Image (spheres, grey):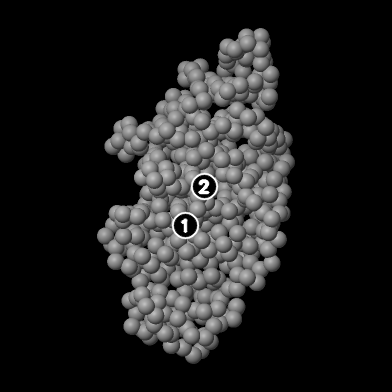
């Protein structure tokens, strides 16, 4: 393997192999290379201008973590078994988001494999894995990656990830990998020592922005695009989820996001909170060309309807009314004034539901709470089942968060394992201050550095066998099967989705062609009119079809033709 590194700021570069540094040859454009190839397994570091040894920004493996040496990897050495594999189309996807460290008792890539059959039985088509890039410490969410080419050593490293992807494909599961290109983590990052990867021209919540349009940005953009292609090529991932694209600052004529979407050939989903249809429009129409983007509006509208909470960004959403808007129009905010933002938000959009990923829970919305409480800790399991019916019969691409399918009661708080005492203190205090104004939650925020906080987030698989949870799991399986077999539920056209509701009574009814969904989200029985005779396809709770009406008990839901 030929060792190369982009270090345009250096006057000299050496590579440390064992005890003796060896000089590297300078090529054009600020690149340096070692003339002699190195075998797989070789440990090495780079030395810039006789400074301290540093990890390779494009390191494929960090066996000892971010502060240890990099290691050479031969990607051709792995024996894949997925030569005939073809991923299911995204428009028919049911996505399952999981975190490697908490998904299984082992908290590793290999530890996740025994639970894949559960996902197959559930009806999942794609597994979305939260970031696995190398970050400081042994536990974390993964969004503070510092060596983004290396799968985390504590999860099982490069071969561990390949075994997991191979096992997913053997079971018919596609794999989407969450990647973070909007910032580097605060601890262990060395890229700024090599070149202008960031710029002070713009600021982000994490500090200096990634350099996408200033001097040296061509190679920075290449760094991230090559990283995306590496996950698709060398790890056989079927797609990527690009974290928080709204945090990019880029005034280039050819936007980095368009470049990234083009090079990944329609295999990257964007997370954006801008409600901007340009994210999924083709470049010919002035868009970036992503096949789909996350739709937080559905989550927020559903959450307010289900829980009654209206703090933080939830103040922008009205129960029932905005749930109906989300189901019929995709985005709730399409240019209206936002109280939370104190400005107009969004842009009118005529999109397909197949271009929007919607969820009732995900890592952000659960972890953004002070204690990481799930929806199943805020409302009853019967109400969770009613909510699941609204999501899994929606025109959108549905996403489930690990354990949601049985109403898991384990929280998912923010956790980390920083090594710098000052950073540890800053993160602790920052979390407390962030939630101090919300119901005195500042006194109850779990310490993100405490290993017990991480342990609390680990799924309890035995919980899925308990009666009420097992009933929830069976309901999710039934809903996903129904979604696959009923043609009206495979249509992404939002103009064919019609919603009526009565906020005072607490019921909502959704029509998707021949399929109707009626849910009572109140604590009292409700009676709704029917349009003639009906065939019940699925029901949860107390439901009675009486000629021209349907009677629903509290938190009951029925799906009928």
Residue 318: x and y, percent? 41, 27
| Residue at image coords 48%, 85% | 35
Residue 414 left/right relative to 386: left
Residue 313: x and y, percent? 39, 38
Q: CA distance from mark 2 to mark 1?
A: 27 Å
Say if 396 sits above or below 536 in the image: below
| Residue at image coords 41%, 80% | 32
Q: Secondary structure at mark 2?
A: helix
Residue 89: x and y, percent? 59, 44
Point out the frontmost of discs 2 and 1.
1
Say if 86 sits above or below 330 in the image: below
Q: Earlier in the sequence, mark 2 or mark 1?
A: 1
Mark 1 highlights which residue?
263
Q: Residues within 10 Å of mark 2 (few under 14, many from 20)?
A: many
| Residue at image coords 38%, 67% | 219
Residue 52 left/right relative to 112: left
Mark 2 highlights which residue?
363
Say if 48 sits above or below 341 in the image: below
Q: Is residue 347 visible?
A: yes
Residues 254 and 340: in front is 254
């Amino acid at each position: 393997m030929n060792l190369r590194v982009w270090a345009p700021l250096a006057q000299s570069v050496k590579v440390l192999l064992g005890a003796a540094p060896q000089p590297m040859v300078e090529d054009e454009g600020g690149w340096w290379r070692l003339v002699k190839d190195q075998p797989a397994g070789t440990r090495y570091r780079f030395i810039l201008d006789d400074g301290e040894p540093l990890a390779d920004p494009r390191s494929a493996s960090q066996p000892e973590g971010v502060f240890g040496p990099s290691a050479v990897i031969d990607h051709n050495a792995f024996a894949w078994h997925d030569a005939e594999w073809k991923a299911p189309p995204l428009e028919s996807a049911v996505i399952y988001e999981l975190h490697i460290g908490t998904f299984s008792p082992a908290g590793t890539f290999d530890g996740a494999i025994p639970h894949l059959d559960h996902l197959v039985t559930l009806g999942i088509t794609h597994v979305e894995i939260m970031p696995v890039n190398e970050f400081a410490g042994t536990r974390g969410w993964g969004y503070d990656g510092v060596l983004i080419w290396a799968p985390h050593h504590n999860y099982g490293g490069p071969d561990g990830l390949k075994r997991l992807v191979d096992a997913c494909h053997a079971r018919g599961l596609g794999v989407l990998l969450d990647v973070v290109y909007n910032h580097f983590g605060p601890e262990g990052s060395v890229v700024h020592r090599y070149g202008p990867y960031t710029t002070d021209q713009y600021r982000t919540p994490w500090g200096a922005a990634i350099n996408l349009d200033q001097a040296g940005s061509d190679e920075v953009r290449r760094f991230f695009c090559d990283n995306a292609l590496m996950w698709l090529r060398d790890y056989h991932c079927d797609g990527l989820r690009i974290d928080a694209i709204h945090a990019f600052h880029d005034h280039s004529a050819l936007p980095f996001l368009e470049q990234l979407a083009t090079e990944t050939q329609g295999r990257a989903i964007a997370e954006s909170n801008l409600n901007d249809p340009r994210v999924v429009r083709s470049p010919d129409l002035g868009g970036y060309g992503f096949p789909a983007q996350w739709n937080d509006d559905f989550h927020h509208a559903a959450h307010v309807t289900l829980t009654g909470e209206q703090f933080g960004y939830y103040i922008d959403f009205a129960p029932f009314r905005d749930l109906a808007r989300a189901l019929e129009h995709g985005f709730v905010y399409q240019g209206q004034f936002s109280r939370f933002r104190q400005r107009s938000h969004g842009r009118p959009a005529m999109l397909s539901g197949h271009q929007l990923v919607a969820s009732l829970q995900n890592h952000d919305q659960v972890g953004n709470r002070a204690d990481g409480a799930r929806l199943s800790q805020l409302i009853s399991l019967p109400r969770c089942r009613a909510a699941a019916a609204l999501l899994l019969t929606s025109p959108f691409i549905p996403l489930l968060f690990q354990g949601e399918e049985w109403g898991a009661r384990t929280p998912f708080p923010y956790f980390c394992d920083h090594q710098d005492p000052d950073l540890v203190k800053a993160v602790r205090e920052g979390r407390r201050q962030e939630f101090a104004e919300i119901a005195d939650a500042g006194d109850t925020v779990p310490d993100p550095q405490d290993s017990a906080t991480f342990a609390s987030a680990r799924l309890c698989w035995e919980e899925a066998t308990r009666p009420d949870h097992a009933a929830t799991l069976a309901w999710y399986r039934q809903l996903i099967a129904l979604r696959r077999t009923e043609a009206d539920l495979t249509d992404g056209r939002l103009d064919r989705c019609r919603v009526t509701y009565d906020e005072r009574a607490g019921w909502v009814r959704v029509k998707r062609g021949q399929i109707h969904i009626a849910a009572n989200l109140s604590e009292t029985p409700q009676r709704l009119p029917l349009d003639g005779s009906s065939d019940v396809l699925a029901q949860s709770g107390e439901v009675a079809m009486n000629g021209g009406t349907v009677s629903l008990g509290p938190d009951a839901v029925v799906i009928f033709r």
